[in-house]
Image (spheres, rainbow, N blue to C red):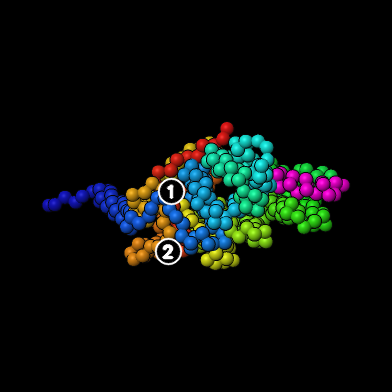
Amino acid sequence: MKKRKPLGLVFVAIIVSVAAVAAMVSWWQSRPQGSPVAGEFTEAVLSERMTSARVLALGEATHGTHEFQALRLQLLQKVADQGFTTVAWEEDFGSVALVDAWLQGGPGTAVEAARLFGYGLNRTRDTVDLLTWVRAQNDQHPAGEDIRFVGIDAARPTATKGLALAWLAARNPTAAADLTARLARFTDESLWDRAVAADVESAVADLQAALTASDDGSEAAAEARQAGRVLEQARQRGLGVGNRDAMMFDNLAWVVERGTASGRERTLLFGHNGHLDRAGQATAVGGDTVGRLAARQWGDDYRVIGTDGHRVGLNSQGTVSTLTVNGRIRGLFEGTTVGYLELASVTGADAELLRGATTMVSAGEPFASWQAGVPPLHTVSVTPAAAWDALIYVWDASPTERLG
């Protein structure tokens, strides 16, 4: 009589078989696909399709990665002489205004200027390199042709409040003194204190009214009034209301419209991929993103370059992690180190590949090291043809070097 296999062994065999099939399917889906059609970004010349945009955005897939931050300088060097003299940042409005003052000839060093950024993720050696180059460029160009930085985020009220009150103090010192006292508790440290945010509602409204009443039509007045608006956005965020991306888009629109009025026709935009892609796919947050709103507002006058990588190191508040992501479109970038590909130039089967979903690396800040072991916490599924106009792919990326 033939012996039956123990039931437990049958279950084990089934589990092993299912796991093997799943592994094979996963490998098949994530294998490199596409022909090697990308070129090195350092050698790339951006097409007129990209450089004629009113807003050209550069996303970074992960905050805290050297290569993604270094691309800011490399891209600016390619397009500054084509009219991109305004640079908008996913950064605190007031803090970037301090950085911009240094770029226009203010005292101190590039390292000291980099430390003025509100977000620690931007206080890096890569940022120092960027500021050094921009300052040198500005020293060689007259006002109006210089490069200006503007922050579009509302997250750290101290510097923004200081900008608005300083401008008001020169025109209405009594009102400025009163409002300084009434807004004293509303700081970077108290931003998320809902009681403080609620208490300063009338003070922020009175500040906006005082700024409007003192408006003399100057550029400095426009910046002060914008600071008042951003301060109210920060207050709303402190209350836990409002859409951050919608706020940033409103601020970006202000930057673009102000630039057009002053002869600055084109704006370069730096931020995380998840804020900037045209389809709003590169984020787990959902809802309208800066990129979706920009594409709706400006259509083809909004162009965006996304970034991705295979092995990506990142530095998040001093914690270094390495992420490995096997996006299937990486075959398009075979043979490059930092590859660049404009999607409109891709044809045939490669174009079809870009019309399907692929896995892309994505990490914000803060990012804990344990998240590196949980792919859903550092990846997003994106349809490149819908999300991007161009892609930059880094095979081996390293963490940023933060300033001490």
Residue 52 vertical placement versus 313 (above, below):
below
Using the image, tell me which numbered label, if any, was put on residue 42: 1
Residue displayed at 78% across by 48% down: 167
Left or right: where 88 falls relative to 217: left
Q: Who's the residue at 45% across and 40% down the image?
A: 398
- C-alpha gap between disc 1 and disc 2: 20 Å
Give the amino acid type for the residue marked by disc 2 in the picture: Ala
Q: Secondary structure at mark 2?
A: helix
- Is residue 167 shown in magenta? yes
* SS for callout 1: helix
**Image position of 254 (left or right of 379):** right
Front one among 322 and 153: 153
Q: Quadrant of the C terminus?
A: top right
Q: Earlier in the sequence, mark 1 or mark 2?
A: 1
| Type of amino acid at the residue the image marks with label 1 | Thr
Q: Is 223 part of what is drawn in magenta?
A: no
Q: Quadrant of residue 162?
A: top right
Magenta: predominant secondary structure element?
helix
Q: Nearer the viewer, residue 84 or 158?
A: 84
Identify residue for label 2: 344
Task: Give x and y (percent) for residue 18.
Answer: 30, 54
Q: Residue furthest left?
A: 1
Residue 261 placement, left or right of 398: right
Q: Residue furthest top?
A: 404
Give, as a single range, the part of the protein colored magenta.
Answer: 156-176
Q: Picture coordinates of residue 63 (x, y %)?
A: 52, 46
